[in-house]
Image (cartoon, rainbow, N blue to C red):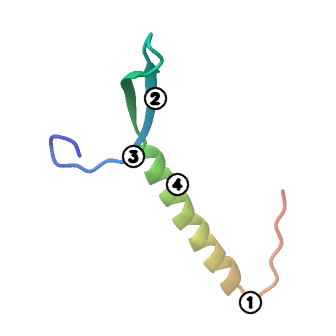
Amino acid sequence: MRRNGEQVWVAWTNKGIIGKDGRIAEILCIGNDVTDRRKAKEALRESEEKLAGIISSVTDHMSMID
């Protein structure tokens, strides 16, 4: 959650850093904001569902020309 209260999606990566004694000395944590990517995927899914609904409701002959 951002300081302004906006919720965001974050992808976390955690990696143990090994010390000289062979044990984990610290953990490196990296977070990437993937909110825009999630929003784009959701918009694409909604668009695909809408198009599928339109195509399935067409009763006349339809051809696609590329």
Circle on res. 15: 2
Amino acid at pointer 3: Thr
State how far apart marks 1 and 3 are (Cα): 39 Å
Closer mark to the observer between disc 2 and disc 4: 2
**Residue marked by disc 1:** 59
Q: CA distance from mark 1 to mark 2?
A: 56 Å
Q: Residue at x 77, y 87 (%)?
A: 60
Q: Residues within 10 Å of mark 2 (few under 14, many from 20)?
A: few
Q: Kindly identify which residue carries mark 4.
A: 41
Q: Earlier in the sequence, mark 4 or mark 3?
A: 3
Callout 3: SS? helix
Q: CA separation, marks 3 and 2? A: 23 Å
Mark-to-mark CA distance, 1 and 4: 30 Å
Q: Nearer the viewer, residue 48 or 41?
A: 41
Task: Answer with mark 2 or mark 4, whichever residue precedes in sequence.
Answer: 2
- What residue type is disc 2 on? Lys
Residue on which the image places disc 3: 35
Instruction: Give the number of the disc on residue 33.
Output: none
